Image (cartoon, rainbow, N blue to C red):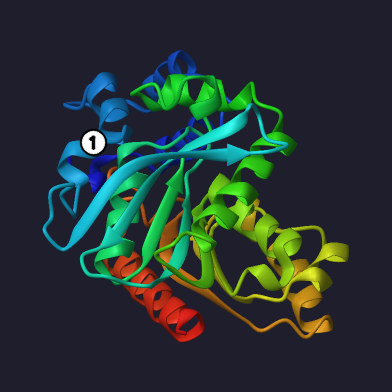
Amino acid sequence: MKKDDIDERVYKLYDEYCHGFIDRRQFFERVAAFAVSGISVFAMAEAMLPNYAEAQLVSFTDERIKATYVEYPSPGGTSGKMRGYLVRPSGDGPFPAVLVMHENRGLNPHIEDVARRAAVAGFLALAPDGLSPIGGYPGNDDDGREMQRTLDQGKLLQDMVNSAMYVKKHELSNGKLGATGFCWGGGATNHLAVVLGSDLDAGVPFYGRAPNSDDVGKISAAMMIQYAEEDERVNAMRADYEAALKANGVRYEMHTYPGTRHGFHNNSTPRYNAEAADLAWERTIEFFAEHLSS
């Protein structure tokens, strides 16, 4: 099914489903109201769900990179320990470090692929699995979403902070640190910019929750903030965020991608917009290259 065949209201329902406002059964039931002749409810709903196998852009066996899973301490986090997917470029290094943070469902195959893309571009990339203290990403997003909702959010964010410092101090790191993330991970990127201060050199949140305006003055990193045009919930925070960035003299740029929905960078679902995703990623890599060089 082509994404143009999917009713616009189904995209909005999918957004509610992805953010945990409705469950899978409710999503399918409500999609039924928008079924049209020749297109089954099941086909329309299934077309919205991620297809990770077809979306992979960089193979885990790609000769340009080396990937492994690593474990490291995480004091103050969910369990005191964390696990992540560490991907390095081939070569001796050192490399600038980048933390790649997942959405609200744990470290799924798409985010691992994004980490590999970052490594291909020359960065030492760590994609932490916030679910690792309770068993790790379970192999599907529905269960992953429910697992992540059970976690203490403060401890989960501390796990991201500890992950950032782990990759920043890694023996293959040049000591410069960037962070990026998507949806929940975008909000976590903004959070890291606040709490890490000068330990973070650059942040690129994709359609993530903005930090409290009173905390923006703590940001030392250069920020590139990526927005989808049709993303009412996140975009409602933009004006206050930008005002606080300006008021506090934070280096920043903001980009909105016309005709895009929340999640437009994720090429495993129909929300994907190839032109916007390519441009946003190109800008991200150039931004990190500018701010993370030795």
For the question of whether residue 66 can be seen, the reply is yes
The one nearer the camera, 259 or 34, is 259
In the picture provided, is 99 more to the left or to the right than 223? left
- The residue to which callout 1 is attached is 51
Q: Residue 204: where, in percent of width, then height?
A: 53, 67
Residue 178 against residue 232 in the figure, above or below: below
Q: What is the crowding at mark 1: few (fewer than 14 residues within 10 Å), some, or many (at least 20)?
A: some
State the image quarter where residue 139 is shown. top left
Residue at (30% x, 59% y) in the render = 88
In which quadrant will I find the N terminus?
top left
Q: Position of residue 74 (x, y in %)?
A: 62, 39
Question: Mark 1 falls on what kind of element?
Answer: loop
Q: Position of residue 76 (x, y in %)?
A: 73, 36
Q: Amino acid at mark 1?
A: Asn
Q: Is residue 45 above or below residue 286?
A: above
Instruction: Please tell me in which quadrant of the rendered image residue 159 appears.
Output: top right
Q: Residue at x 47, y 59 (%)?
A: 170
Residue 147, image x, y percentages: 54, 21
Residue furthest to the right: 214
- Tag count: 1
Say which residue appears at 29% left-offset and 44% top-offset.
68
Nearest the eye: 50 or 292? 292
Q: In the picture shown, does residue 224 fall above or below 49?
A: below
Q: Is residue 238 left or right of residue 8?
A: right
Q: Is residue 30 visible?
A: no
Residue 239 relative to residue 234: left or right: right
Measured along the vertical axis of the image, is residue 249 above or below residue 185? Answer: below
Image point (22%, 25%), residue name: 43
